[in-house]
Image (tube, grey):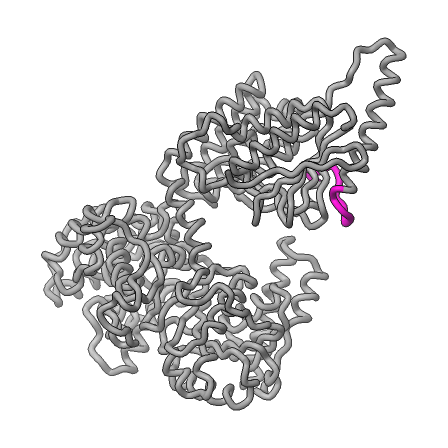
Amino acid sequence: MKGQCLYSVKDGFAILEVDNPPVNPLSEGVRVGIVDCLEKAQADSNIHGIILTGKGRSFIAGADISEFGKPPNEEIPTIHAVLEKLESSEKPVVAAINGSALGGGLETALCCNYRVSSSKGFVGLPEVNLGLLPGAGGTQRLPRIIGPSEALKMMLTGKHVPAKKAEEMGIIDKITDADVIEESIEFLHDAIVIDEAIKLSHDEKNDPLPLPLPKVRDLNSKLNDVRGDEKVIVEARALAAKIRKGQFAPNKIIQCVDAAINSDSFDEGMQKEQEFFIECLLNPQREAMIHIFFSERAASKIQDVPKETEIMPINKAAIIGSGTMGGGIAMCFANAGIPVHIIDQDENNLERGVAVIKGNYDFMMSKGRIDENQKDAVMGLITSGLEYDEIADADIVIEAVYENLDLKKEIFKKLDEVVKKDAILASNTSGLDIDALAQVTNRPEMVVGTHFFSPANIMRLLEVVRAEKTSDQVLATIMSVGKKLKKAPVVSLNAPGFIGNRMLFGYTTQANKLLLEGALPHQIDSALENFGMSMGPFRMMDLVGLDLGWRARKLSKTNPPVTALINDALCEQDRFGQKTNKGFYNYKEGSRAPHPAPENEKLYEKVSEDNGYKRREISDTEIVDRCILALVNEGAKILQEGVSQRSGDMDVVYINGYGFPIWRGGPMQYANMEGLEKISNKIDEFAKNDPDFWSKAEIIEQLLKENGRFGEAPTKEERKEKLSFNQTSVAKNF
C-alpha cells in the first residue's frame, strides 16, 4: 500500500503525521494509517488531544487520482470512513496545516475540531479543474463555515486561498510563523483548559456534561441566513457560465450547495453530494481534464535528457526589445523575483515599453491583485537601457524583436560577442529557424527557442524549441525556468511553426475553405465556439489583424493561396480587423464585440465564383469536423516526425495557448475519446473532395493496427528520416 501515517506523542498529545511524498495524497496506506493512529490515540488515557499534520511541505493534497477507476478494496477504509472516524473523535483534533491543504486535504481539515496553519500554508477545493466536485463533504462543510456565496466562489474558481485570507474567512482558527505542531499543541492545550473551565461552570449549575466538541457540520446559521433566497444560486450560475462555459461539474457543485442550504439535515446534503460526485466521475469530461492534469506534468519530462542533469543558475535575465512581447516577458521574470534588464536601441520605444509595464502593474493594483509594495518590488527588479554592454553579466538573454530572421541573426551575432560565454541565448519566435540563429554564434549548444504567447505575462503556454545542438543542460534549465515563471512549458523540435502554429495552419485553412464553399464567418465561429473553442477562427483573425499576412504576402511577391484571397480582398478595402473596427466583422469604437458584416457577403460570393467554388449550405457538424480534424491530422504528422515528444504535449499546447476546451482534453485526446477508427473514416471521406489537403498521417493507420490511441512519439531510431527545418508537411506554408 502506498503511503503511511506516523505516530508519536509529545506533552500528552498524539501527533499523526501523514507520510506519502511528495504531496501526501490520501492513498490507501495513508487512510489505513490514520484510522489505526486515531484508534491508538483514543485508547490511550494519557492522550489529551490529537494533532494531524503532514510530513514535508504539504498537509494533505487531496485524493490519490491514480486510484480513480480502480475497484474498491473492502478491507481499506474509504475517505468518507476516515473522515467520519476523524470527525467523531472523542478527543479534540487539530489540523496542523504545514503547507498545502487542497481538495481532500481541506475536506480532512474541516472534519477536525480546529485548524492551525503555517503562515505559508494555503487551502482550496480545486476539484472543478479535474471535472469533479469536492466529494468528501467539501460542498456541505465549506458553506457552513464561510457562507454559501464565498464557498461557491472558491469551488467554482478552484483557486488556492493563502492562510491569512483563510483565517479572515473563518476557515483557519490561527496562523503562525513558528513551528505549526508546537503552536497546535499550545492552541489545543488552551482550548482544553477553557473547555474544562466552562464544564466546571456548567457543573455548578447542574448542566449536563460533557460539552460537545465543535464540529463544522453543526454550523447552520450561515445556511439559514440564505434559505429561500435564490440570489446566491443565481449569481453562482452566472459565474459558472462566465468562467466554466461548457463544463459539467460546476452545475453539480451549485446543486450540492443548493442542497446544503435547503436540505433538512447534513446527512441529506451529503447524500446529494455523493450522487452528483458519481455523475461527475462517470462523465467523459472528467477523463479529459485528468488527462490534461497528467499531461502537463509529463510535458516537463524530456525523453532523452537525464533526470540528474544539472540546472544552471538564473539570477539575472535580459530582454532584447521593449515591445508588447518583450515587456510581457520582462514582467514574467520580475513576477518570479528574477532581476531583468530590457534593451532597446530606440529610446522612445524603450520609454514607451517601460511605461506600458508600469501601466499593467497599476491596473493590477487598481483591481486589488497586488498592493503598492508589491508593485514597487517588481518594478524595482526591472531596469532598462540602450547598450548591449549593460547585459554582459546576464545568465539568460531572450531576443523578442519582430519576426525577421536577418534581424534576429544580427542580434545573435552581437549577443555572442558581448554576453558571458555560459549565458543562454534564446529567441522568442513563433516559427523561425532556431538552428539558423545558433549557427551565427560560437555557442550553438547555448541557443534555444522560447515561444511565449501574447500577452506573455498572462498566457501560460511556453513552447521550448530544441535546436540541433541545444545542450541537455540548457534544455533542462529552460524547462525549470518556465515552471518558475508559472508557465506550462512544452518541448518542440525545431520545425516550421513548431507545434502550435503548425497545427493552426490547417485549422485556419479549413475555416477559409468553408468560407469559400458557402459558410459565413459568424456561422463558422459560432459552430466552433459551441464546440468549446474560446474564440472562433474569424474572430481570432480580426483580433490578430488581417493585414499582417496580407503585407507579408505582398512583400514576398508571390501569388497568395486561394484560401487567402478573401482575407486579402478585405484588406484592399482597409478592413484589417479590430484595429480598423472592421474586418470579417464590424466593431463599435472601443468595443471588441463582433457584429455581422452583411456588406462583405457579395465579396465572398465573387471570390468563390471567380475561383470555381459553388457555394452551398454547410452544417455545423461539418464545420466542426473539418476544422478540428485538421488539427488532429497535422498533430498526428507532428507526432510521427517526433517534433512533439507525445500527443499529450500537443494537448497542453492547445489548451493553454489556443483556447481549446479543457473539458475535451485537447485535440489529440479528443480523437482518442472519439475513437481513431471514426476519425480515420472521416478524414478518408474529406479526402475524396480535397485529397491534397487531407493527406492522412501514416501513424493513424499504424495505431489502428496496434492500440488505437495517440501516445508517445516514435524514437529517433524508429523514424524514417532525420528531421530538418524544411521537411515537415507544412514547411512550404511558413
Q: What stretch is highlighted in magenta?
A: 168-181
Above or below, comparing residue 603 to residue 669 in the picture: below
Residue 732 in which image quadrant:
bottom left
Q: Position of residue 598 (x, y in %)?
A: 27, 56
Above or below, comparing residue 692 to residue 243 in the picture: below
Q: Tell me if 25 is positioned left or right of 643 in this view.
A: right
Q: Can residue 438 be seen in this view?
A: yes
Residue placed at 55% from the left, 89% from the top?
Answer: 418
Above or below, comparing residue 493 to residue 166 in the picture: below
> In front here: 64 or 229?
64
Q: Tell me if 181 is positioned left or right of 190 in this view.
A: left
Q: Is residue 179 magenta?
A: yes
Q: Position of residue 354 (x, y in %)?
A: 60, 74
Residue 496 in which image quadrant:
bottom left
Residue placed at 64% from the left, 76% from the top?
Answer: 383
Q: Position of residue 332 (x, y in %)?
A: 56, 66
